[in-house]
Amino acid sequence: MITKQSILLKIQIITLISFVLVKFIARPYVLKEFTSKPLTVFVLSYPNFCEALLGVLILSLLLLLLDHKIKANMHNQFIYFIACFLTAAYTILQEFKVHNLGGANVYDINDVIFSIIGVIFGYCLLCIIKPKTVS
């Protein structure tokens, strides 16, 4: 039986693989061989989308597990919101150099936009798949 958590795990694995492929294989090739601005923006900012999406999915699953362990019985939508809020705060504050926990970043508005899109996409996935605490 396929569980909702296993679906989210598969999405995380696919996202991680696409992150590696874009960042370490496609990005160097595109930056060297192409002059297309949209393609350049994509390969430079797509890792921010992946970081945000993975953050939302991982945090939501951890918060669901924590909710189950401490028997807080929080509403799942509230957990999804908290995961999105924390991920957005981390990724966007990193772009504005409030912290450097993810490494040395160069500010780029496209990175901020891709991070926001990743958080929104993650929230939409959670609302569609609806993972919940185990009863």
Image (tube, rainbow, N blue to C red):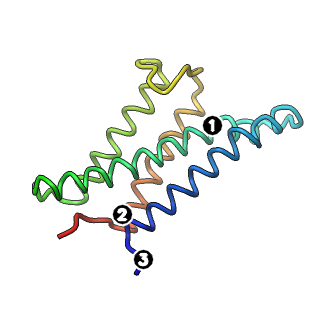
Residue 24's x, y, as percent?
71, 38
- 16 or 96, which lies in front? 16
Find numbered disc 2 in the image and state the secondary structure of the residue it sits on: helix
**Residue at image mark 1:** 45
Mark closer to the observer (3, 1): 3
Q: Is the C-beta separation of discs 2 and 3 under 8 Å?
A: no
Q: Is the C-beta separation of discs 3 and 1 under 8 Å?
A: no
Rounded to the nearest whole Å, what is the CA distance between mark 1 and mark 2? 25 Å
Find numbered disc 3 in the image and state the secondary structure of the residue it sits on: loop
Find numbered disc 1 in the image and state the secondary structure of the residue it sits on: helix
Rounded to the nearest whole Å, what is the CA distance between mark 3 and mark 1? 32 Å
Q: Earlier in the sequence, mark 1 or mark 2?
A: 1
Q: Residue at x 52, y 33 (%)?
A: 112
Q: Residue at x 46, y 48 (%)?
A: 54
**Residue at image mark 3:** 2
* Above or below: residue 13 compared with residue 31: below
Given the image, on which type of amino acid does mark 2 rest?
Cys
